[in-house]
Each structure stands twice: as structure tokens, then as C-alpha cells.
Image (cartoon, rainbow, N blue to C red):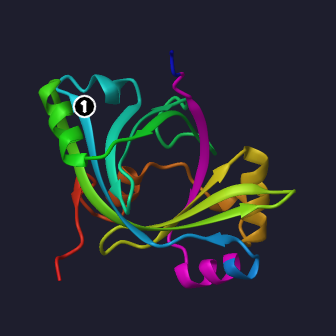
Amino acid sequence: SKTKTDVVIEIEVKILEIDKEKVMQTLRDLGAEELEEILIEERAFDFSDNSLIKKRAFLRVRKKANKTPIDLKTSKNKEWGEGTFQEAEEIEFDVSDSEKAKQLFLALGLKQIKHRQKNRKTFKINTKDIQSIIDIDTFPNTPTYMEVEGSKENIIKTLKLLGYSLEDTCSLPASKILEHHGKNPDNIFFEKK
């Protein structure tokens, strides 16, 4: 029997340099479902000719809590970070071992182009009026930002609930946000304690 791989269209915006505690309290006050804060370790891969980047595609394996998803994101925007909303086709599935996934990609001739960590706190709003996911991301020694994901209509409604509008948002990828803050977008880690 054949299994169909679902290609999901992900639509999101980001708000940079948020007050993390204030936003989280607002989400709690709104009754949003709160998920555990997790550390995400992400490795991104491309071919030596950068053919994925040239197609505005991003292949990565992420280690996060008890999941290890591999995903391929392909921007539907002309450029990453262009336009009000970042729209991307996303194919994602879980594997059991991030190290073996990395070895497989390298054996297939890909090279690792990014290796980084961030903390992520996720909230979900799921009411009859709004369905959205809010990810609050913090890279090491970098101001926290928020991603709001959902349909365009639900993103706008969620922003309004949080006291923001589309004028406050951007669609920059994490790499551009890190560069904006003077950080290496390809290699960033929390210090070992």
C-alpha cells in the first residue's frame, strides 16, 4: 500500500524583540494552551552547489524534546523574508535518530551548512474563531522573537489579541534575524553549564 506524504503550506509572520514574559502572560490570560519550553538543536544541509538554497529550500533535522523531525521547507515567496507573510511548502516526518539522519545526508553528498540551538516556548490558540500556533524563540544572547502561524486571517486575529498588527511584523528567516543582531547564523549555541 502507498502512503501519501502530505505537503503542508505553512504561513507565518515574526515579531522581533518581544517582551517574552509579557507576551506569555497575555497568552495565559487568553487561555491559550501552553506547551513545555524545549531546547531545539537544528542542523541544516545542502549540496555543494547550494542547489537547495538557490531553489529557496531548506533541509534540516531538528532534535527537540522527544521528537526528531526532518523537514524540507520551500519558500513560496520570491525571496526568504520578502513579503508580509512567509509562505512555505513543508514536508515533515519524524525519525528516531538525528545523528543517523545527519550521517545519511552526508553519505548522500550533502554538506552541513548550519548547526544551532534555540529555546522555544509554544502556545496554541484553538477557539471557534481562531486557530494559531505561537512560537516564542530565543537564540543564545539574542533578543527573543515570536512566530505566529496559521491562516492569514487567523494570524491577523492573533496579532490583534496580543496587541500587535501586521505593521509590527516581518517575514525574515532566523538566519537574517541572527545576522541583524550581529550573530553567526550558521553556528550558535548556549554555553555548557
Q: Is residue 69 above or below residue 53?
A: below
Within the magenta stretch, is there residue 10? yes
Q: Is residue 15 above or below residue 113?
A: below
Image: magenta residue range: 4-27
Q: Quadrant of residue 21?
A: bottom right
**Tag 1 residue:** 46
Q: Is residue 108 above or below residue 72?
A: above
Q: Find residue 49 and report its horizontal and vertical position in percent.
A: 20, 22
Tell me: 187 left or right of 25: left
Estimate how packed mark 1 is, as few (under 14), some (14 to 19) or many (20 or more) residues with alpha carbons within 10 Å: many
Amino acid type, label 1: Asp
Seen as rendered, the residue at the extreme top is 1
Please name whichever residue, 148 or 8, is drawn nearer the observer in this view of the structure. Answer: 8
Tell me: 23 left or right of 189: right
Seen as rendered, the residue at the extreme front is 1
Q: Residue at x 28, y 42 (%)?
A: 44
Q: Residue at x 36, y 72 (%)?
A: 142
Tell me: 14 left or right of 48: right
Q: Is residue 6 above or below residue 15?
A: above
Q: Residue at x 37, y 63 (%)?
A: 65
Q: Quadrant of the C terminus?
A: bottom left
Q: Residue at x 62, y 77 (%)?
A: 23
Q: Quadrant of residue 118?
A: bottom left
